[in-house]
Image: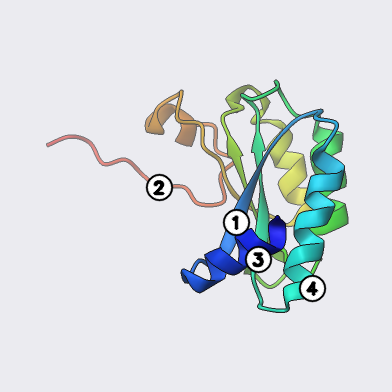
Amino acid sequence: MWRVDIMQAYTAKIDAFALNIAAGKPYNAASIAAAFAAAESLNLGFKLFFSFDYAGNGAWAKADVLALLAQYSHHPNYFQHAPGRPLVSTFEGPGSAADWVEIKRTTGCFFIPDWSSLGAKAAIQLEVCSVRYRIPPHS
């Protein structure tokens, strides 16, 4: 399955997949390993990166995020924002924002969360994003 999906994406000029993964799912380890094995075996330069889903099955434990990044962020098919800066995103999870201070420090990741439930201004004020944008006042 992964090989076919990657080939179709590559043919369509897609460079990478965000692997949206929910915490604690029993199939995560096998599915993630299969995705990386398929990407590597195809030798296309196709990349993968993690998007930790905090809404699908609850919050991720910081230790589990760190373990997955330690295992895969140096894989040749893990998307790097810049050399040594693996790209990581989330879906929701603003209640765990403080975890990302240590995760970023430990992994050097470039972090792009999706905390859309808060709205842009409140999400930016959490100050753990790799990129901070200033919201100009309304004219």
Question: First in sequence: mark 4 or mark 1?
Answer: 1
Q: Is residue 107 left or right of residue 7?
A: right
Question: First in sequence: mark 3 or mark 4?
Answer: 4
Question: First in sequence: mark 2 or mark 3?
Answer: 3
Quadrant location of the N terminus in the rendered image? bottom right
Residue behind mark 2 = 133
Q: Secondary structure at mark 4?
A: helix
Kindly indicate whether the residue at mark 4 contacts the one at mark 3 (C-beta within 8 angstroms): no
Residue behind mark 1 = 17
Q: Secondary structure at mark 3?
A: strand
Kindly indicate whether the residue at mark 1 contacts the one at mark 3 (C-beta within 8 angstroms): yes
Residue behind mark 3 = 47
Q: Secondary structure at mark 1?
A: strand
Q: Amino acid type of disc 4?
A: Ser
Q: Is residue 43 left or right of residue 97?
A: right
* Res 79 visible: no
Identify the residue shown where x is 75% and y is 56%.
35
**Badge 2: residue crowd in 10 Å (few <14, some 14–19, many ≥20):** few
CA separation in Å, label 4 and label 1: 16 Å
Residue 21 sits above or below residue 107 on the image = above
Kindly indicate whether the residue at mark 1 contacts the one at mark 4 (C-beta within 8 angstroms): no
Identify the residue shown where x is 64% and y is 31%.
97
Residue behind mark 4 = 41
CA separation in Å, label 2 and label 3: 27 Å
Q: Estimate the x, y position of residue 119 in percent, counting from the top left.
A: 40, 27
Question: First in sequence: mark 2 or mark 4?
Answer: 4
Nearer the observer, disc 3 or disc 4?
4
CA separation in Å, label 2 and label 1: 25 Å
Q: Estimate the x, y position of residue 6 in percent, counting from the top left.
A: 63, 64
Q: Estimate the x, y position of residue 95 in percent, counting from the top left.
A: 63, 22
